[in-house]
Structures are given as structure tokens and as C-alpha cells.
Image (cartoon, helix red, strand yellow):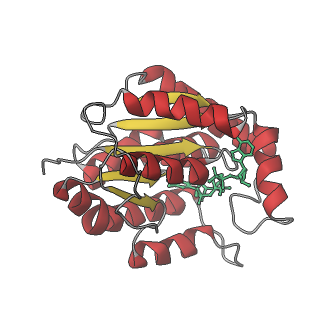
Amino acid sequence: MSTKGLFITLEGIEGAGKSTVARWVGEWLGRHQIRATLTREPGGTPLAERVRQIVLELGAEGLSPTTETLLMFAARGIHLENLIRPALERGDCVVCDRFTDATRAYQGAGRGVDAAWIESLARQVQGSLQPDCTLLLDLPVPMGLERAKSRRAAATDRFEAEAQAFFERVRAAYLELARREPQRIHVIDASAPLRRVERQVTAVLERLPGVARGTPSRDGGSAGGETA
Ligand code: Z5A
């Protein structure tokens, strides 16, 4: 299926600032009169959010890395069919907090799931659809964990319960992905104060095809999409 809108994804370890930046990106696009649909993974639609609950909740039953990977792609399939593809077809810019790079980093590098199998699932679930632009919010792991901890004292999901070494593997995998795909993946120094993070993100957005030609509105305006 061909798409019309831009597909922007945000990635990084927890506490990197993805949710904060996703909101800015939506506002920035709104000011440039570009309709934005803000969403997240796993989740983004009512049904996919139910899969999110299953995959994230700290429960009595274990989930193997293989099962966890399948659940991530099951949620992604639902999300793509019901929200992402229709929004792109309408010409919206879709801003998604995490996508398949998260599976490569968390399930692939973090849990040791076979990278070739992940790519094969990605092809089956996404077809040729890839993000046009990915903002990788990079920061040292202890800093991200500290930020996340300042919001909640104890682990509330199965990833927050992981040790620092797990997140070090995830961070290294993200940086390796960015090294391999520099045209798509833009590394943002997320350890910087929010103002400087915003400036780095704006510089990337201004170079996006189509966006650069957009006319900024004088009075601003908000993203026209929905937040999951
Ligand atoms: N996961 C997976 O394993 N495989 C997959 O395929 C997918 C996901 C799609 C849920 O993700 C989990 O799913 C995730 C990976 C896994 N687990 N982990 N880790 P999530 O995105 O919903 O959860 P999260 O990564 O834990 O998000 P988060 O902790 O909410 O982080 P964030 O969105 O990146 O950060 P934030 O909420 O914008 O900011 C955190 C705090 O830091 C907040 O108080 C901000 O005000 C502050 N902040 C942010 N930036 C700054 C700067 N620059 N300076 C100072 N303070 C800042």
C-alpha cells in the first residue's frame, strides 16, 4: 500500500524523554499546518493496548523472549491496520513513540532473540512500510533510569524490573542501528537540558521533505490527531 503522510518514530531507553518530545513534535507540526496523529507502541488502539497490558504487566506467569517478540508484532499488526496505515493514507504525519527498532533493541539485543527472525516478522507485518525519520533520544543509562525512577519508586512493568546491563545492551543496539542507517535515524543528545533537546529535534524536523515547504502558521495550532 502506498502512503502519503510522513511516518516519524521516537526511540530510546526508558526515561530518555520520548513522550515529552512526541508532544513537541505534534505541536511543531501543528504550527506548520501539518495534521499529526500521535500514538505509541506497544498499543495505540484499544485492541493493541490490551496486548500492551499483557506484554508489560508484572504477573505470575512468565513470557519467553520468543513469546514477547510475537506479542510485540501482534500489537504492531493491529496498530498498523487500524491506525497507522489509515492515518498515513489520509496524509497525516504519524508520530509514534517506539516502533520496530524497539523490538530490534529490546528483544534482539536485550533478550537475545534472533535478529534474522525479527526482520522476517517485520517484513510480514509491515511489508515495505518503514519510518521516514526516527529520532533516537540517546543518553547514559544511569541518567535515563534515574529520570524514570524519579517518577515512580518501584518497577511497574517487566522492563522497568530489568538490570542496568540489559539497558546498556539496548542502548548499544540503538546506536548501532543509527550507525547503519544514518539517513533515517537521527541521534539526539537527550542528556542535554530540554531546551537544547528541543533545538536538536527542530533542526531534524526542518530538514524533512515536505515539512520544510510547510508554511508555519502565525498563531500556532495543535496537532490534529489523537494521543493513545
Ligand atoms: N518495548 C519492547 O520491548 N519492544 C517493542 O517492540 C516495543 C516496546 C514497541 C514500554 O515502552 C516498554 O515496551 C519499554 C520497551 C518495551 N520499556 N522500557 N524501558 P514505553 O515507551 O511506554 O515506556 P518507557 O520507555 O518506560 O517510557 P518512559 O519511561 O515514559 O520514558 P520516555 O517517554 O522516554 O520519557 P518521558 O516520560 O518523556 O520523560 C521522563 C522524565 O524525564 C519526565 O519526568 C521528563 O520531564 C524528564 N525529562 C525528559 N527529558 C528531559 C531532559 N532533557 N532533561 C531533564 N528532564 C527530562
For the question of whether residue 138 can be seen, the reply is no
Q: Nearer the viewer, residue 197 or 27?
A: 27
Q: Quadrant of residue 83?
A: bottom left
Q: Looking at the picture, does residue 150 appear above or below residue 211?
A: below
| Residue 12 visible to the viewer | yes
In the rendered image, the vertical position of residue 193 relative to residue 225, given as above or below: above
Q: Residue at x 36, y 26 (%)?
A: 207
Left or right relative to 90: residue 118 = right
Pick the residue in front: 100 or 66: 100
Q: What residue is at 37 percent from the left and 45 percent from the top? A: 218
Q: Is 187 on the left or on the right of 226, as rendered?
A: right
Q: Residue at x 56, y 68 (%)?
A: 55
x and y percent of residue 25 in the render?
Answer: 46, 46
Query: Residue 157's x, y, as percent?
Result: 70, 67
Q: Position of residue 104 (x, y in %)?
A: 49, 42
Frontmost residue, 218 versus 107: 218
Q: Where is residue 19, by image quadrant?
A: bottom right
Q: Give the answer, above or below, for where 178 lies relative to 45.
A: above
